[in-house]
Amino acid sequence: MERATVTSLLSHPSNPHLIHISSPFCHSLHTQENEAVLASACGDGTVKLWHVGAPPASNPLCSFADHAREVAGLSWNCVRRNLLLSASWDDTVRLWDAAAPAPLGTFTGHTYCVYAAVWAPAHADVFASASGDCSVKVWDARRPPGPPTLSLAAGGYEVLAADWCKYNDCLLATGSVDKTVSIWDVRRPAGPVAVLRGHSYAVRRVAWSPHSPTTLASCSYDMSVRLWDTAAGEDACVRVWDQHTEFAVGLDWSTLVEGRIASAGWDGAVWAWDVRGDPRG
């Protein structure tokens, strides 16, 4: 069985019982097309596909080795379920078909590490990328290696995370080294429409709720997980969980159980939270 440092895993979205968790060594997503297939992003620059029910000798199913540096993030397409994005420290985003040996396209508009690439949930050809070049870019996947359709300037700070609102396809949340969560309306790209403050260190991941248009979660190097109500103005932070004892770096919502969220940290712990009650470790 192959060995490499795994930086990201992505489970198949067709299995809603599984929660997407990121850690310093692991970030995974199941595919939309086959709930038993797992994609992993690795520190050696590869993206690997695994079958969770297969014996070790049969895994990985395949290995995509086109990136020149560590792969930091993955995103399966929710409409065309065989398509996968990979974001890398080699400054690029690559588009893959799970059944093809080579990337379908390479997107090269960033000038520094790309930490995240996320498909828009309602548009099969639109995705956003977050980068250490202090920008967020929106792309049309039908025209690689063309330029991005939109570039958002993030105020001179590295952007580590991005996620689209599931209820408004024009809203995008980002997490930055400046300790803030920013909400962007892509129809008004001059600046964020809201900035959420409360974290004391860089924001590593943001995730919109699949059950509420105004509920957003974030986790940070300050070891906390925060819940935000984007409609609440200055009192946007409604919950703080601080059980992690090291950087909190992974976060996602359950699509089946409303209000259920999970976080992962460098402390080796995964916490499952109910936004309406107490955490369950």
Image (tube, rainbow, N blue to C red):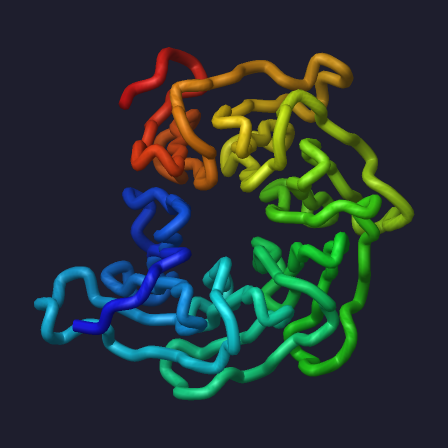
Furthest residue in direction right, as rendered: 190
Q: Is residue 177 left or right of residue 247?
A: right
- Residue at screen point 41% across, 64% down: 43
In this view of the protein, can residue 236 be seen by the observer?
yes
Q: Is residue 130 left or right of residue 18?
A: right
- Residue at screen point 67% across, 81% down: 144
Front-most of residues 117 and 214? 117
Q: Where is residue 136, by image quadrant? A: bottom right
Front-most of residues 156 and 12? 156
Front-most of residues 180 and 112? 112
**x and y percent of residue 33 in the render?**
35, 66
- Residue at screen point 48% across, 65% down: 71
- Quarter holding the C terminus? top left
**x and y percent of residue 275 in the render?**
45, 19
**x and y percent of residue 211 in the render?**
51, 33
In this view of the protein, can residue 12 be seen by the observer?
no
Front-most of residues 281 and 173? 281
- Residue at screen point 22% across, 73% down: 2
**x and y percent of residue 217 in the render?**
55, 30
